[in-house]
Every structure is written in C-alpha cells, then in structure tokens.
Image (cartoon, rainbow, N blue to C red):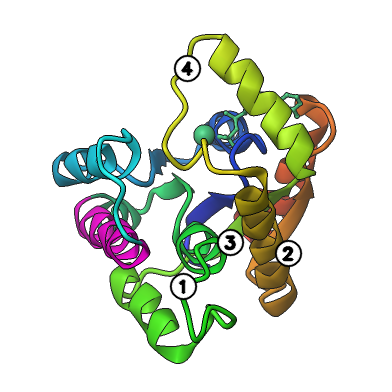
Amino acid sequence: MNKLITFEGVDGCGKSTQLRRAAAYLRDQGCDVVTTFEPGDTSLGKEIRRLLLAGEFVPVAEAELLLFLADRAQHVHEVIQPALASGAWVLCDRYSDSTLAYQLAARKLGDAGTNPCNEILNGMLSFAECGVSPGLTLWFDVAVDEAMRRMQQRVKAGEKSTRLDDEAVSFHERVAAAFVEQFSLQPERIARIDAGVDMDAVAQQVEAVLKQRFEALA
Ligand SMILES: Nc1ncnc2c1ncn2[C@@H]1O[C@H](COP(=O)(O)OP(=O)(O)O)[C@@H](O)[C@H]1O
Ligand SMILES: [Mg+2]
C-alpha cells in the first residue's frame, strides 16, 4: 500500500503532536520516515503560506482554494513524490481532506453554496494531488469546543494563531462536519481516531491502526 499517511482534523485536534509520535514509532520499527506539512513545506510553499495565513491579505474563497492547491502541487512534486519513490514513509500534516473541509465546505464554495462536493471542485482537488493520494488518512475526531480550548492554550504558550484559526466557531463547526462526512464516504481510506482522550491513549489508537493497515508492521 502507498506509504503516504495524512493527518487530518480541526485545528487543535492533536495532528502535529500525534504525527511526531507516529514518526518516532515508525522509526523505532526501522522505517525510513519523512515528516512534512501543508501549507508551506517547500520554498515556494513558504511564500504561499505567508500569503494565506499571516493575515496581511484576505483572499476571496476562490483565490484561497487555488493558493492551497498550488502549494500542494509543488509539495507533491518536490517533497512527497521523491520521498515515496525512495521507499520512505511520508507523514503529512494536512492534505486534500483539509482543503475540502476548510476551503470548500466551511467557505460554502460550491453549487449555490450547498454542495461543495461537485465534480469540478473534486476534479481540482485531484488535479493538485498530481496522482498521489494517501494510502491511509488518520482523522483525529474531537469536539470543536475541546479543540478550541487546546488552541487557546497553545496561543497562551506563545504560538501565534493563523488567519484560519481565528475564524468563528460556526466556521470550525462546518469544518468538523465536513470531516464526519468525508469519513462516512471513504471509510476504507480514512481511519477515525478518538482524539478526545489523553495523548498516550490517542497514540495507542494510531499504532493499532498502523499495525492493522500495514502488514509490514503487524
Ligand atoms: N490528547 C490531547 N489531550 C490534551 N491536549 C492535547 C492532546 N493532544 C494535543 N494536545 C495539546 O493541544 C494543543 C494542540 O495540539 P496540536 O498537536 O498542535 O494540534 P493540531 O496540530 O491538530 O492543531 C497542543 O498544545 C497540544 O500539546
Ligand atoms: Mg498542527
């Protein structure tokens, strides 16, 4: 199976924390692991990330989508594809499911604002992946109020929030609902992780899913 694993869920669900732990677990098993994230893990992507998230610009929804997709195409060609070709596992913090949840569903970008999953938009998501879809997606499912509480702690600890973090609660609720919907549509690719429990308990679920999905780890 394709060794690209994407980490998805609302801001504050624990993706970055669990990505670090999953990388450590896989390395302990002797795996070669590349960790990466979107947007912004190429030189061009860094610039795109700043344009998107620093808050200096507020792109219209269509422009926001296209910038995220531009970042992805660059990222796939420069980082993900070469790493997979070298035989490495690639753990990626956010990928197309986030674009679907944030830039399409939460922004209500679609037919008459009601159907973000129309064919053209899905075709655009697929185009930007340049043929590289995840073998497995871990979806960290947590209540939005708990995720927001964690985000606030992170900000208190000195981390700067992004333009998207600062959206209204209703926006984050639409993001969360989109992940629920994606999971119901693609349960073979997406594994649901209960992210409302403590970090060790979340990490144990992740390891169990990895062992179950990848023969090499069983
Ligand atoms: N299971 C957990 N329980 C409580 N706090 C957590 C848990 N997982 C992560 N955190 C904390 O919540 C904050 C957000 O976690 P982070 O991994 O940065 O989330 P994300 O990358 O999804 O935005 C961090 O301060 C992190 O230490
Ligand atoms: Mg993160």
- Relative side of 123 to 180, left or right: left
| Kind of residue at badge 1 | Leu
What is the distance, in whole Å, between disc 3 and disc 4 at their CAs?
29 Å
Label 1 sits on residue: 109
Q: Earlier in the sequence, mark 1 or mark 4?
A: 1
For the residues labelled 4 and 2, say whether their Cβ atoms are less than 8 Å apart: no
Q: Which residues are magenta?
A: 61-78
Q: Earlier in the sequence, mark 1 or mark 2?
A: 1
Q: Position of residue 123 (x, y in %)?
A: 38, 84
Q: Where's residue 41, x and y in %?
A: 28, 41
Secondary structure beneath disc 3?
strand
Residue at image mark 3: 136
Q: Earlier in the sequence, mark 3 or mark 4?
A: 3
- Asked if the beta carbon under badge 4 is closer than 8 A to the nearest atom of ligand 1, the reply is yes
Q: Secondary structure at mark 2?
A: helix
Residue 9 in view, yes or no: no
Residue beneath label 2, please? 180
Q: Are marks 1 and 3 in contact (CB under 8 Å)?
A: no
Out of 131 and 154, give the one closest to the viewer: 154
Residue at image location 25% in from the left, 42% down from the top = 57
Residue at x-position 49% and y-position 10%: 158
Q: Position of residue 168 (x, y in %)?
A: 60, 44
Q: Which residue is mark 4?
A: 159
